[in-house]
Image (spheres, helix red, strand yellow):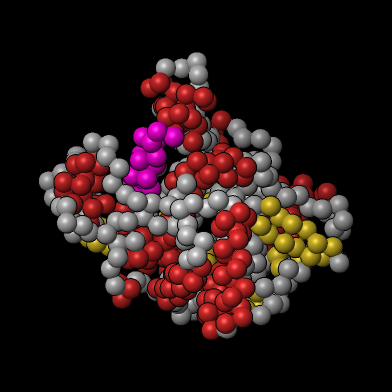
Amino acid sequence: MGFTCATCHTGEITQAGNRYLVEGGQANLDMIAFLLALGDAIEANQANSSKKSRYKSRFFWNTVLQFDWPINPFSGSRYLEKSRVYVRGFTGRNASDVPGGPARLDAIGSIINELHVHHANISDDNAVPPVAPVSYPYIWDLSDLQCTQTNCVSNNPIDRNVGEVLGVFGYMNIEDSWIPNFFQALLGTAGWNLFEATPKVDNVYKLDRALAKAHSPKWPDTFPPLDPQLITLGSQLYTQHCSSCHIDTTDGVDGDELTEPNSIGRRFTKVIQMEYSDIGTDPAFAEDFGLRKVNSGLLGDMLSYSHPDSINPETGIPFGDSFPEEFNSLVLLGVATGALKKDHYASIGFIIRTIFTYPELSWGNAVDALITEYAVDQVDGVELLTTSYRAKPLDGIAFTGPYLHNGSVRTLRDLLKAPENRPTSFFTGTTEYDLDGAGYMDGGSFYLDTTIRGNYKEGHIYGTELSDLNKEALLEYLKSL
């Protein structure tokens, strides 16, 4: 189907008859609804002989004319059935009583189900229903940030995007085999390629470099002008009440807003991590998936052999002495993405690429240089706080509603209200922009009920006690970012 980052990270806003695309913003896409409809369409093609005949003809000629070897041009029916089984399996494993609707998806829950259930070739009964929808994050200036994703589960876009591929239509065989896990782990530590996997690391890197060109949107000239005096007052209020968590990058990034230099001297814009219980926002994402454990299997053995001296925080026992049968699913996801990268970086294709990219360097130095380039200089690990939420810079925030990590607050104006005064429900799916509140209008076909766990609107009370004038000023400044 050709899905890339743009599918979920291209926003759209309409106002006064004008249409605006927000590159790197949140798409108004209901992914699960789309996949359910796709499954219906596949089955309709299978059931109708005329439709199926047209499909098989297109499959044949596309395969022949595009030289898609080794695909058999006569295997259209088999590929159609394989697609049906996959799509129905994905939507079945990731069915939820807390649907995301437009612009939200429990991506982490789905990734964990796909990797640790589907890719491990165990029964779908082991899947956990995703119950923590999260807004598609805006991704401009991503490579400059200290870490990525809602809970900073990774610190560079390559890790993040390879992990995403594993959960969205990619594959990595981590199922048990006749070879003992400990022996496979030893081979993996020694540099053997252990996995069949579909993520194309080179293409993921190219996508990230394209994304690096995306920058935050500005308040359009075609919108009513903002009030300069309110913006000035709002800037002062932002410094007092918001900047300790959400660094203001509109005036550049100062030294104290950067991380300490990493092992190659690179610094990044700080991203503050806070425990979900301190912020008071919906706990489902942190509790259900930040703490979720899965069968350790081969990935656990690989972690044990690669980090034998690391201490299990729950038992105080080094990994090399004893590794638990079940372990944190997000940590094991990191092991999986690390293994895929390691395998790719040892491949002949990657080594050839390093020679042409850095012809002036020795072979070993050229490999190290290209690995560093792929990691966007994020060569050191990140401290994984699985139950934290990140607070990143708010450039372009006026065009990224609805707000909070789970999209439970419709507008920025609503966010500055005490939680009990925020709307308990609203509709999503419209692209019509709310000029006054900064966010989408209350409209569309999806009913979002904020009284349901996963959709809670509570927490993040910062700024809610300001005077009406100061709230107006802060809102005006947020629109200007």
Specify whether 153 is left or right of 120. right
For this orientation, the residue located farthest to the left is 321
- Residue nearer the viewer, 49 or 119: 49
Q: Residue at x 46, y 53 (%)?
A: 70
Magenta residue span: 333-349
Quarter occupied by residue 88: bottom left
Question: Quick check: 239 above or below 4?
Answer: above
Q: Residue at x 85, y 58 (%)?
A: 223
Specify whether 4 is left or right of 311. right
Q: Measured from the top left, where is residue 194 in percent x and y?
A: 28, 46
Q: Measured from the top left, where is residue 317 in percent x and y?
A: 15, 48
Count of marks placed on residues? 0
Q: Can residue 387 be seen in the rendering of this structure?
A: no
Prevailing SS of the magenta stretch: helix
Q: Is residue 338 on the magenta stretch?
A: yes
Q: Residue at x 73, y 50 (%)?
A: 217
Question: Quick check: 354 above or below 304?
Answer: above
Quarter occupied by residue 42: bottom right
